[in-house]
Image: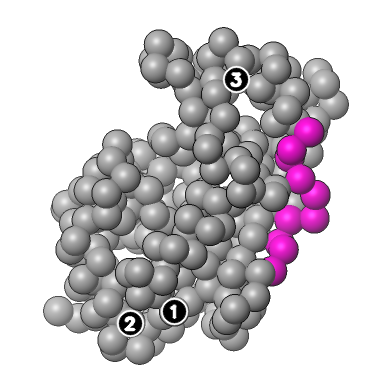
Amino acid sequence: MFKLKPKIKAIITDVDGTLTINREDYRLEIEAVKAIRRAEGRGIPVVLVSGNALPVVVSISRYVGTTGPVVGENGCLIFYKGRIINVATFSAKEAAEVILKEFNEYIEQSWQNRYRVFDFAFKIKENFRDKVSFLVSDIRRFLRIKGFDNVFVTFSGYALHLTPTSGGKDKGLLKALELMGVKRDEVVCIGDGLNDIDLFNVCTCSATVSNADEELKKLATYVASKPSGKGFAEIVERILGF
């Protein structure tokens, strides 16, 4: 049973794989959009937390209709009430340049990197998608050798990310909650991937969609019976008491 606090003051959610049709699609699930608008209509702001560049996440927020802080670049940047707040204190850009030069046979820059400040993303080339775990390990090892101990390497299911240790979804969420004046035990965090573990470590109440990574499911308060965006809508229905 999904046990909730008497008053949930905000819903925190990942975007890709959680609000989309599935974990391999960029299209938003219409039921998820409707669920967000129902929550907002009940006075519960929705906070988007994503690895996407901030302009991308702000655009989603604007057209879907969320009112909470918008957290981009895996927690490194926030847009709220017309202003941009830096959470990270240094950039992974130098590490990204080194990685691209060394591993250009396997990866290519995300088009979003032109609009990124702290966190940088790479697409893994089609021929090497089945070697993601090995590639991530190799890049981590290479960065350590080069002295980049202040950069995290993760794979979201959509892209490989280099994130400065001064960033992270947990740090971005904590700053967003501070901006809203909301406590950690007054929100529900929703996600699907291993890069959402940071979110779940902040929230005392969490939920995953049915097709989430097993490791994340083990941390969740509730696991939806439906996948991705439909699962998100199911979770919101429970939060709203439908």
User: Pointer 2: residues within 10 angstroms few (<14), some, or many (20+)?
Assistant: some
Closer to viewer: mark 3 or mark 2: 2
Precedes in sequence: disc 3 or disc 2:
2
Task: Residue under label 1, please give it.
Answer: 67
Q: Is residue 156 magenta?
A: no
Task: Residue under label 3, please give it.
Answer: 137
The type of residue carrying mark 3 is Ser
Q: Position of residue 48 (x, y in %)?
A: 45, 64
Q: Compared with residue 45, is residue 116 higher up or lower down, i.e. above or below? A: above
Describe the colour scheme in one phrase: one colour
User: Pointer 3: residues within 10 angstroms few (<14), some, or many (20+)?
Assistant: few
User: Mark 1 falls on what kind of element?
Assistant: loop
The type of residue carrying mark 2 is Glu
- For the residue pair 69 and 138, the one nearer the viewer reads as 69
Residue drawn at (48%, 23%), measured in percent from left and top?
Answer: 124
Which region is colored magenta? 85-94
The type of residue carrying mark 1 is Thr
Residue drawn at (24%, 79%), measured in percent from left and top?
Answer: 38
User: Mark 2 falls on what kind of element?
Assistant: helix
Q: Position of residue 147 (x, y in %)?
A: 85, 26
User: Magenta-highlighted stretch: main secondary structure?
Assistant: loop
- Distance (Cα) linking label 1 and label 2: 8 Å
Q: Are marks 1 and 2 in contact (CB under 8 Å)?
A: yes
Task: Residue under label 2, please give it.
Answer: 40
Q: On the rendered image, what quadrant is the N terminus found in?
A: bottom left
- Distance (Cα) linking label 3 and label 2: 41 Å
Q: Position of residue 127 (x, y in %)?
A: 40, 11
Going by the image, does 48 lie left or right of 173?
left
Closer to viewer: mark 3 or mark 1: 1
Residue drawn at (17%, 52%), measured in percent from left and top?
Answer: 226
